Amino acid sequence: MTALLLHYVDYPAAQPSEALPLVVLHGLMGNADNWRAHARQWEKQRRVVAVDLRNHGRSPHAEDMQYAHLAADVLHTLSALGIEHFDLLGHSMGGKTAMSMAVIAPERIRRLIVADIAPVDYALDRHDDIFAAMQAVADQPPVSRTAADALMAQHEGDLETRRFLGTNLIKGEDGCLHWRVNLSALRQGYPDVARAPIDGAPFNGPVLFLRGGDSSYVLPEYRAAIMARFPHARIVTLKHCAHWLHVEQFSIFVDAVNRFLSA
């Protein structure tokens, strides 16, 4: 396995700081740019590095979506940046990648924040509507975002989800819109994405799990799996938000991360 050098967005600390850098990992179909507003808040106290995981954003494409490989990509990229020790935040798929990094290189991670995901297997059909919507656009590349939305709406009824997916559309040389993500690899590799992160020795550092109160991703019955892997974890529920808790409760999410990192 050869680790990939990933694309990243680097936000230097606004003023000299002894705080460790905060590394941020997005979820499925996301990218580093989704965290721009959050990074602008956190960079007041520390350097922030937001990463595009493989097959997402501006990072290289590859067929494999196993968490061991996603984690190795991030660690390789941080080493290339000279970042040996850091705090780590991951949302959804990025959270599972972060948990896998804590197995591979626990000595490099001071504090870990996992946003609305648990170290468990999830149903393989959870994103069938999303993949069908995106495939419709891939099969009939539209010339406008309105046309792309109409194609996606045949399969995905939620407007906010379609808008989120639309952030991945870029105009090609043919004048049509195409997916920047590697859709075929993500669809084929989704069974790996849905699986629990890689197994290994428990991570004994401080860990904060933030879950959306209206989300079904971190259920009470998952607590045992969380504590088995992260014996010093705290699980905190943010009210009035679902899976995209970092967007729906932006200020509360930013403040919770700040308090945990400064503890």
Image (cartoon, rainbow, N blue to C red):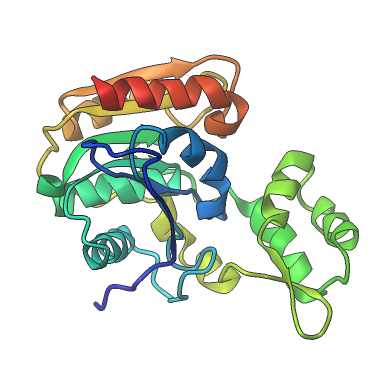
Compared across the picture, whether 72 is left or right of 25 comes to left
Q: Residue at x 52, y 65 (%)?
A: 186
x and y percentages locating residue 28 in the rendered image? 52, 52
* Residue 176 visible from this viewpoint: yes
Looking at this view, name the residue that lies furthest to the bottom: 174
Confirm whether residue 222 shows in the render: no
At a point 58% along the width and 67% down the height, the residue shown is 181
Residue at (42% x, 55% y) in the render: 193
The one nearer the camera, 67 or 15, is 15
Q: Residue furthest top?
A: 239
Give the image quarter of residue 87: top left
Image quadrant where one finds the C terminus: top left
Q: Position of residue 250 (x, y in %)?
A: 56, 27
Residue drawn 68% across and 53% down? 165
Pick the residue in front: 129 or 186.
Answer: 186
Which image quadrant: the N terminus?
A: bottom left
Percent x, y for residue 210?
A: 40, 26
Which residue in the rendered view is the most extreme toward the front? 15
Q: Position of residue 133 (x, y in %)?
A: 74, 58
Is residue 49 left or right of 123 when viewed as pictured? left
Of residues 203 and 190, the one nearer the viewer is 203
Q: Viewed as shown, does residue 249 lie left or right of 168?
A: left
Position of 140 relative to 240 (above/below): below
